[in-house]
Image (tube, grey):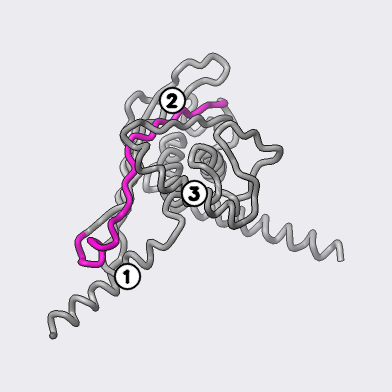
Amino acid sequence: MLKTIVALALAAIALPADAKQRRVVEPLPAAIVNNNHVVAVEVSISPLAQEKFAKFEAKAAEKRAEARLQPVALDTQFAARPGEDEYATLPFQKMFPLVMEDVTREWGLKGGQPIKLVVTIDTLKTANAAMAILLAPSADQLAGIVEVVDPATNASLGSFYVDVINSHSGWGGMLMRGGGVREKLAEEFSLESARILAGSTKKDLKARQKQREKEAKERAAAEGAATTGTR
């Protein structure tokens, strides 16, 4: 009985463990590191990962129908950029470029060399809830190669591989995992990409995060002041 209680307690407090790996395949020219901005993102899914994506795509379409929004196909052209509240309802190949653009801009990549990112996703795995609850680690994973391209000439400027793995174990770990797994993986994949594009290391990660938070507060204050002024 005591062993059971201890196991349940451990399961309840288990925290997710994250592993995010980046590997440069072809280094970017030094002149454009931390001196670039993303103007386009193309993403394709390799045949090896297609089957796993079917469930995610069906769920996104279901959410879009529940929100009473018009269906979106891969060839759909948006009249206006979708808001973040719509991301969970979009096909992955429509959602992912939006997230990549958002994250790289938030990371401070807003000027310099225009670049296009050509992303090929080769791995998608989702955590097995039953295994995690039994305290056997299970993980969500998104991995693929990113080629950085000059949009004017289509010449390759460099490439890197990103492998995001979020491990979960126990009831607590699965509860903290929550929903929006697809969007979280896309955001973390984009974050790791931004760190390479910015030449960032762990040392300046906190500084950049603080700058992002400062800018967000300033925007919120400015919007609040504008709202007050219109009353």
Write the residue at 32% across / 39% down: 123
Q: Give the range drawn in magenta.
A: 114-136
Secondary element at tag 1: helix
* Residue for badge 2: 30
The image quadrant of residue 160 is: top left
Q: What residue type is labelled 1?
A: Gly
Residue 75 in view here:
yes
* Residue 152 image offset from top left, x and y in percent: 57, 17
Q: Which of marks 3 and 1 is in front?
A: 1
Q: Which amino acid does label 2 sit on?
A: Ala
Spatial separation of the CA atoms under disc 1 and disc 2: 44 Å
Q: Earlier in the sequence, mark 2 or mark 3?
A: 2
Secondary element at tag 2: helix
Write the residue at 70% across / 40% down: 80
Is disc 2 surrounded by few (<14), some (14 to 19) or many (20+) residues within 10 Å? few
Write the residue at 29% across / 74% down: 12
Spatial separation of the CA atoms under disc 3 and disc 1: 30 Å
* Residue 8 image offset from top left, x and y in percent: 23, 77
* Residue for badge 1: 172
User: With respect to residue 95, does 14 lie above or below?
Assistant: below
